[in-house]
Image: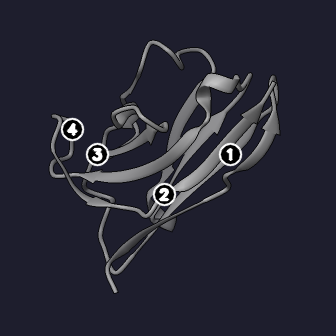
Amino acid sequence: QVQLVESGGGLVQAGGSLRLSCAASGLTISNYAMGWFRQAPGKERELVAAITWSGGSTSYADSVKGRFTISRENAKSTVYLQMNSLQPEDTAVYYCARGDAPYYRGSWDYWGQGTQVTVSS
């Protein structure tokens, strides 16, 4: 079965941290860019962070720069999102996605089912 499975979401107080994981099965991700997105209620899905196939380059939304870190372990077919200094506005469902090329260019072909992150004030 081809899938991306996110884990690590939950409820945390403002200022706290969470580490999300995205594990791929039946799907190669080592040659592709990967991204983390989020969608809050009533808002559009937004790209939070992206990483190239090798991990050599990363990109972040302005709202999370300096607080979130995306990384990957291709040998484990897993991508991570370390989230520090979480704020209530970070509350959303977080999704991982596979890019359709080694470098992120705005096109994503596989998506996970999402994991809920809730930050209480």
Q: Are marks 2 and 4 in contact (CB under 8 Å)?
A: no
Residue tagged by mark 1? 19
Residue type at the position of mark 4: Tyr
Residue under circle 2?
Answer: 114
Q: Circle 2 — which element?
A: loop
Q: Residue at x 43, y 64 (%)?
A: 113
Count neighbours of disc 4 (C-alpha within 10 A) and say few if under 14, some if 14 to 19, many if 20 or more.
some
Seen from the viewer's position, the closer of residues 85 and 13 is 13
Disc 3 from disc 1: Cα separation: 19 Å
Which mark is nearer the camera, 4 or 1?
Answer: 1
First-in-chain label (3 vs 1): 1
| First of labels 1, 2 by sequence position | 1
Q: Is residue 4 above or below residue 13?
A: below
In this picture, residue 23 sits left or right of residue 13: left
Q: Earlier in the sequence, mark 2 or mark 4?
A: 4
- Could you tell me which residue is drawn at 22 percent across and 36 percent down? 104
Q: Give me the disc on residue 103.
A: 4
Is the Cβ of the residue at disc 3 closer than 8 Å to that at disc 4?
Answer: yes
Q: Which residue is mark 3?
A: 33
x%, y% of residue 77? Answer: 45, 65
The residue drawn where x is 31% and y is 46% is 53
